[in-house]
């Protein structure tokens, strides 16, 4: 292998000069060429863009793929320039398990039929999630990653070159300053014949330092202009990322709208079949937002008396005018807060205990609740009936 000794020595000398200049600047022993305020603002804006783009990119990846092992695997595939294998989402996997369980339990039974319906919905949710991840990766993550791995690397490279050009310029300024000081000192001494050669050498050294300074200044100005143009391109980067952000928000809105519609359809299916399986229990309105799920054991349903309404003229019931039956009252714990819609209803607070009972002809979705001197209708789904 051939080595260019002169080039190697020259590079080593330049590196040493820059290191000395950088060290003296840090110690306050050398002057530093300052960039103008506009250039400094461009540098600050570029650094801020890079830092926040990295954070947004990493957190979006966590949002789309919460599993860190899967993210590492995808990163390795990407670095190896290999196609990332298709991954089944958690919703699709859950739907598959539910379908297989239904086939094992018997798809014709109530439990099996419900497992199939819920499983199919979970599969549709999983497919929608996979489409959302794919769309977000292409339209949002890829442009952010391209900026960090492309434009920002170019900007960083040119900034390093500019830093080196500035160190060279300041080192030339320092050498010229020393040469001028030595030349002035020599000129102040008496003109002896034996000192004239040294004076000529000092004068030549100052001339050479001036020439080096002009060359260094030209290279610094040229590099500063190149770097400035790249930094001003950050504005175009913001515009591009803004468009990508709009596409990400639209994809997310579409994904959640699909999920909501799938769950509404499932709720309608389960609501229509629940009355057949549990005819005496509450059947929710499929178009209404379902109440929060209760993790406690299901409460027993209070037996209801089937009779004629006490006010057949209008079919209404004023809880304040009725008296509790001699038997059939029970204690109930309130599961969730409930705001009374009118004066005939009783407002509820979670975890409080009230007395409830049913009256002949009442809507099976409601009971009469009492709390001290307060009385009113309460929804069955907000209660856990106690023994």
Image (cartoon, rainbow, N blue to C red):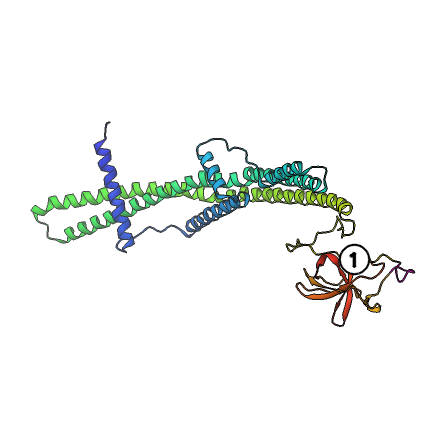
What residue do we see at 55% from left, 37% from top? 138
Task: Kindly give the residue lying farthest to the bottom in the view shown.
Answer: 373
Task: Kindly give the residue lying farthest to the right in the view shown.
Answer: 313
Q: Is residue 8 left or right of residue 80?
A: left
What residue do we see at 47% from left, 46% from top? 54
Residue 168: image location, x then y, percent:
29, 44
Q: Is residue 90 left or right of residue 69?
A: right
Q: Is residue 24 left or right of residue 63?
A: left
Stretch of the chain drawn in magenta: 308-315
Q: Is residue 173 visible?
A: no
What residue do we see at 46% from left, 50% from top? 48
Q: Is residue 310 left or right of residue 266?
A: right
Say if the magenta span includes residue 313. yes
Magenta stretch, main secondary structure, is: loop
Q: Where is residue 353, by image quadrant? A: bottom right
What residue do we see at 40% from left, 42% from top? 156
- Is residue 26 or residue 341 the one in the foreground? 341
**Mark 1, other Cα within 10 Å: few <14 / some 14–19 / many ≥20:** few
Residue 126: image location, x then y, percent:
61, 39
Q: Is residue 365 above or below residue 272?
A: below
Residue 363: image location, x then y, percent:
82, 57
Q: Which quarter of the figure is the C terminus placed in? A: bottom right
- Is residue 276 or residue 189 the one in the foreground? 276
Q: Which residue is mark 1?
A: 303
Q: Which quarter of the figure is the N terminus placed in? A: top left
- Is residue 119 or residue 304 the one in the foreground? 304
Q: Is residue 277 visible?
A: yes
């Amino acid at each position: 292998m051939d080595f260019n000794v002169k080039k190697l020595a020259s590079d080593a000398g330049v590196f040493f000069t820059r290191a000395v200049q950088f060290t003296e600047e840090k110690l306050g022993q050398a002057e530093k060429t300052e960039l103008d305020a506009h250039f400094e603002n461009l540098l600050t804006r570029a650094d801020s863009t890079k830092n926040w783009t990295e954070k947004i990119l990493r957190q979006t990846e966590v949002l789309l793929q919460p599993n860190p092992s899967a993210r590492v695997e995808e990163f390795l595939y990407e670095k190896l320039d290999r196609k990332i294998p298709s991954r089944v989402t958690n919703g699709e996997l859950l739907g598959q398990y539910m379908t297989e369980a239904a086939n094992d339990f018997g798809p014709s039974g109530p439990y099996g039929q419900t497992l199939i319906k819920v499983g199919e919905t979970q599969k549709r949710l999983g497919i929608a999630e996979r489409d959302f991840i794919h769309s977000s990766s292409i339209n949002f993550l890829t442009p952010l990653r391209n900026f960090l791995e492309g434009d920002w690397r170019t900007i960083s490279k040119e900034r390093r070159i500019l830093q080196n050009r500035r160190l060279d310029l300041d080192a030339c300024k320092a050498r010229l300053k020393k040469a001028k000081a030595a030349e002035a000192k020599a000129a102040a001494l008496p003109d002896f014949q034996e000192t004239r050669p040294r004076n000529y050498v000092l004068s030549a050294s100052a001339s050479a330092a001036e020439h080096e300074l002009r060359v260094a200044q030209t290279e610094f100005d040229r590099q500063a202009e190149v770097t400035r143009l790249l930094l001003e391109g950050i504005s175009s980067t913001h515009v591009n990322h803004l468009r990508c952000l709009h596409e990400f928000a639209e994809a997310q809105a579409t994904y959640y709208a699909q999920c909501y519609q799938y769950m509404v359809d499932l709720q309608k299916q389960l609501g229509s079949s629940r009355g057949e399986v549990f005819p005496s229990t509450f059947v929710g309105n499929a178009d209404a937002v379902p109440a929060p799920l209760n993790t406690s054991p299901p409460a027993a349903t209070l037996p209801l008396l089937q009779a004629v309404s006490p006010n057949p003229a209008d079919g209404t019931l004023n809880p304040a005018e009725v008296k509790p039956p001699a038997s059939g009252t029970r204690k109930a714990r309130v599961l969730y807060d409930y705001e009374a819609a009118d004066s005939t209803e009783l407002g509820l607070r979670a975890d409080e205990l009230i007395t409830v009972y049913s009256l002949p002809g009442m809507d099976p979705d409601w009971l009469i609740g009492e709390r001290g001197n307060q009385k009113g209708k309460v929804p069955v789904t907000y209660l856990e009936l106690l023994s």
